[in-house]
Amino acid sequence: MEFIELKNIEKNFYVNKQERQILKGINLSIKENEFLTLLGPSGSGKTTTLRIIGGFETASKGQVFFNGLDIGKTPPHKRAINTVFQNYALFPHMNVYDNVAYGLKIKKFSKSAIKDRVEKTLSLVNLSGFDKRSVKSLSGGQQQRIAIARALINEPKVLLLDEPLGALDLKLRKEMQIELKNMQKNLGITFIYVTHDQEEALTMSDQIAVMNDGEILQKGTSENIYNEPKNAFIASFIGTSNIITGTMERDRKVTFLKTDFECVDPMPGSVVQIVVRPEDIEIEQTPRDRNSLKGEVIEVIFFGVNYEMKVKTGDFIWKIHSTKSYERGQFVYLFMATEALHVMEMERSL
Amino acid sequence: MKLTKWLSLSYLILMISFLYAPIVILIIFSFNDQEFGTIWNGFTLRWYQAVFNDRQVADAVRNTLSIGIIAATTASIMGTLAAIGINNMRKGTKKVVLSLSSLPVATPDIVIGVSLMILYVAFFRLVGAGSFGFGTLLVSHIAFSIPYVILAVLPRFKNMNPFIYEAALDLGAVPFKAFFTAIVPQLMPGIVTGFLLAFTMSIDDFMVSFFTTGSGVSNLSLLIFSMTRRGVNPMVNALSTIMFLSVLILLFIINLRDSQKLKSRGE
């Protein structure tokens, strides 16, 4: 039995009197204590999926199971799930203490128990002593922490987070990513996290579900999604990559740019797309007897950690990350190891 | 240079005296120690004494205040609910309903008064019972007050985070509780302004009351009107002065609240 399970969830909305399908049959299972990220561009349906789990939307079709029970018709206030909303949604007419204490007051905890728990939770998010402050006087990062504290104080089994770090600056975002991940591990709560930031998803998640256009395209671990993207959309959405069209006549042999390459994949179809990550291409002065291509360096950019170079072979321009730099106009050989080539079925609409 | 200054100053004085002279004269003569005529005959408070000892006046005051308070309270509740509904409508419908519900503000009072009167007559005939009186007066005051509450409450939604209600539900509050702990406190400044506006309008109203009240039920403005028909009595002056001052104080409170709101938003 799965902890949370979505079965064939469909959701239709009326936009300008026209029915639009926002979710097209979502199937997703989430284990207890897992950090799952719904990753996708805006409009992909990830927030709607989250809102269905939280109970703020009902699915047009399909079922939501929580510990084996169908909770599709359970209202949000009866679910052991709490949410950290986009833009925090703190109560502006209450101070920090009353915001954090809200859930316990509703549940009629005693005053002293509430005081204890609020203090503990505030220290958990590093905001001890902020009790009497008005939430309007807090910075974005502090408001974020209060929103998390307000949800966590209820000791939910599941915490839903909708782009919680979207409004923070880069440095603070990185810090909060680590803090959130640690909190999730230490408290043993299932996190379902919505973001469009692929880097955020890769650093924090146990499992990532990549969404686009109301569908889950691929679900797997960070490494899995990064190294074995199922199609060109995922490959281009997660990290930078070279995507090239080629042909495959038999297993473990792929042809592109008029050159044969050895690879590790069996044949998914005769016309295929090949993904090569920029860091998996080696630039060399001399050709090898296999998996090697000649090209001309047309651009070199210094990035601090490494160089990004663009190398032209025929009509195709390769993006390559390397610590060594080469001169513009220089002719070089590109070596791609058999494991560096990832062959995918041709995507229909791209 | 001096001439233009002098001209502009005298124009200002002329304009202000044109606006306020009648009221100032009314206030002055409310202290005049003479039954008839407009000649000053020394200071007295006896007209005010008479006002406070008059049973008719006491009844009218009671009617005015109770109608004002009940009407403003009812209008505040109905108007707030209406504002929430309007806020949640889709854009097109929202515009139409908002215009429809704020139109009575711009409609002449006499039109509202006469149409309400016709409505009641038709209603009484349909039901076969009922008569004009306190009830009709109260319903009328509620009716013309609601738009003011809607117009005062609606702007409060603009700065509100749309997920606040859901956040309260998420934390375990039942919808009713979520509404009262998360939404209402944020609307409160608008609701109070709406209440005060409605109360002022109710005290202030003559036209609608004139057409919708029945025998024996008078509010202050109706009483003053009927007193003047029997000849101007200095008591009328005293009563009018009291009414003018109370409305003035109410408006002052409303304006003070508005300017405080602007200040707190400027922070």
Image (spheres, grey):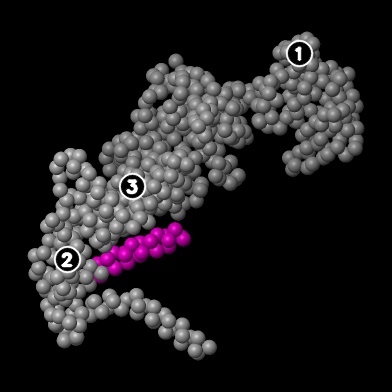
In this rendering, the answer to whether A296 lies above or below B187 is above
Q: Is residue A209 left or right of residue B10?
A: right
Instruction: Please state the chain letter of the residue tagged with numbered disc 2 in the rendered image.
Output: B
**Which residue is at 37% across, 46% downward?**
B83
Identify the mark at residue A94; answer none if there is no mark.
Answer: none
Discs 2 and 1 share one subunit: no
Instruction: Please state the chain letter of the residue tagged with numbered disc 1 in the rendered image.
Output: A
Segment tinted magenta in the rendering? B245-267
Q: Is residue A93 shown to the viewer in this render?
A: no
Identify the mark at residue B80; answer none if there is no mark.
Answer: 3
Q: Nearer the viewer, residue A127 or A61?
A: A61
Whole-percent x, y for residue A245 in the image: 77, 22
Magenta span main SS: helix
**Which residue is at 16% across, 86% downward?**
B42
Q: Are marks 1 and 3 in contact (CB under 8 Å)?
A: no
Q: Quadrant of residue A283?
A: top right
Q: Is residue B264 left or right of residue A175?
A: left
Q: Is residue B253 magenta?
A: yes
Instruction: Report the amino acid beneath label 2.
Output: Ser
Instruction: Report the amino acid beneath label 1.
Output: Ser
Classed neighbour count for the residue bearing mark 3: other residues with Cα under 10 Å, few (<14), some (14–19), many (≥20): many
Identify the residue under disc 1: A270
**Which residue is at 13% across, 80% downward?**
B35
Estimate the spatial distance between the alpha carbons at disc 1 and disc 3, rounded to whole Å.
66 Å
Identify the mark at residue B226; answer none if there is no mark.
Answer: 2
